[in-house]
């Protein structure tokens, strides 16, 4: 089969397909024929730095999610040809991931789905919509009557969060730091140009999904109403930690701060997401599509960061 295999720091320009053996099935694992996969910044981090870490299996096939069909169900109880998605739990790091024509994956990472969407649309769902869903409902306890602020909304996770929250019945305020991108968040009820200070500029916010991260987190905490919740899920601001953060002084009284970690998906959650998408006729937003033979171009696009929305790679074309 064809796959991307890396053992050292690999800039996008050096990504290439190689021929390797199709992995052999063993108990507790299933063989998946990959139809398509979404791309994530996590894989960029792996290629450009994390590949050096001792906990990474090397050589590694990157890719933390995919959509495909069961090729060999092993002892899983699944059926050959069954539609599935797979994500997280060490995929692409502790064991080989989705940048391949076939993937050998632990049963716990593989979830059967029912969907009429085409493969590229299905591939845009797993990591992005699972993270949005967990942030909104598990962490923010989103209600129909909420006014949700999505800070840093012009990314795949932001677009998915807008879609879910609007379908659920919430008012949504979305921000971007670039005026040229305001049109991209037009589905929100309000669009705000973010200059780093939202305090005093937005009103009525009961829940906030902060995708910018520590760079503006203190400001986000001051934006929500008393009793409001802030979930920090993204790090688009490029600041990964907040040195000198004082929870007593920096978290306003009666405001709650949480975060979502997407490493442990469950079958019910994945099923609920696909049922919600079908019920509300949501079409996952794709920023760019590539064929697997042009995986180098897809990685260059990912590293450039100029694609508005999810990058999806079609493997079985």
Image (cartoon, grey):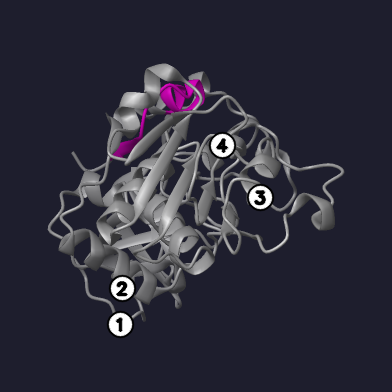
Which numbered disc flags the more N-terminal residue, 2 or 4? 4
Q: Residue at x 80, y 56 (%)?
A: 247
Q: Which mark is residue 77?
A: 1
The residue identified by callout 2 is: 73
Q: Which mark is residue 6?
A: 4
Which numbered disc flags the more N-terminal residue, 2 or 3? 3
Within 10 Å of the Cα at label 1, are there few (<14), some (14-19), or many (20+) other Cα atoms? few
The residue identified by callout 3 is: 56
Q: Secondary structure at mark 2?
A: loop
* Residue 311 magenta-highlighted: yes
Q: Position of residue 316 (x, y in %)?
A: 22, 43
Q: Secondary structure at mark 3?
A: loop
Determine whether 136 is above or below 43 in the image: below
Q: Residue at x 20, y 52 (%)?
A: 282
Residue at the extreme left: 116
Q: Position of residue 273 (x, y in %)?
A: 31, 64
* Residue 31 magenta-highlighted: no
Instruction: Give the total number of marks visible in the rendering.
Output: 4
Q: Secondary structure at mark 4?
A: loop
Q: Residue at x 39, y 66 (%)?
A: 143
Within 10 Å of the Cα at label 3, are there few (<14), some (14-19), or many (20+) other Cα atoms? some
Within 10 Å of the Cα at label 2, are there few (<14), some (14-19), or many (20+) other Cα atoms? many
Q: Is residue 291 visible to us here?
A: no
Q: Which residues are magenta?
A: 299-314
């Amino acid at each position: 089969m064809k796959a991307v295999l890396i053992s050292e720091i690999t800039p996008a320009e050096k990504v290439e397909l190689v021929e390797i053996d199709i992995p052999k099935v063993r108990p507790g694992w299933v063989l998946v024929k990959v139809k398509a996969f979404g791309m994530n910044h996590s894989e960029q981090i792996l290629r450009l730095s994390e590949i050096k870490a001792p906990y990474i299996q090397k050589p590694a096939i990157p890719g933390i999610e995919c959509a495909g069909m069961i090729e060999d169900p092993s002892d899983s109880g699944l059926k050959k040809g069954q539609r599935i998605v797979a994500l997280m739990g060490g995929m692409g790091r502790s064991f080989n991931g989705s940048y391949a024509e076939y993937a050998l994956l632990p049963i716990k990472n593989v979830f059967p789905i029912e969907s009429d969407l085409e493969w590229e649309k299905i591939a845009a769902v797993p990591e992005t919509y699972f993270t949005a869903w967990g942030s909104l409902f598990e962490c923010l306890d989103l209600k129909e009557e909420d006014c949700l602020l999505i800070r840093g909304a012009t990314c795949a996770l932001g677009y998915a969060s807008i879609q879910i929250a609007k379908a659920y019945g919430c008012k949504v305020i979305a921000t971007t730091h670039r005026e040229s991108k305001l049109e991209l968040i037009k589905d929100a009820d309000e669009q705000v140009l973010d200059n780093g200070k939202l305090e005093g500029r937005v009103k009525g916010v009961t829940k906030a999904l902060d995708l910018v991260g520590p760079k503006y987190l203190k400001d986000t905490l001051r934006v929500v109403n008393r009793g409001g919740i802030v979930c920090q899920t993204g790090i688009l601001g490029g600041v990964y930690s907040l040195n000198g953060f004082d929870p007593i002084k920096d978290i306003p009284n009666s405001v709650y701060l949480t975060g979502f970690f997407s490493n442990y998906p469950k079958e019910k959650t994945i099923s609920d997401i696909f049922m919600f998408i079908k019920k509300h006729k949501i079409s996952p937003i794709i920023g760019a599509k590539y064929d697997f033979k042009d995986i180098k171009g897809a990685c260059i696009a990912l590293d450039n960061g100029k694609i508005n929305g999810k990058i999806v790679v079609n493997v079985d074309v």
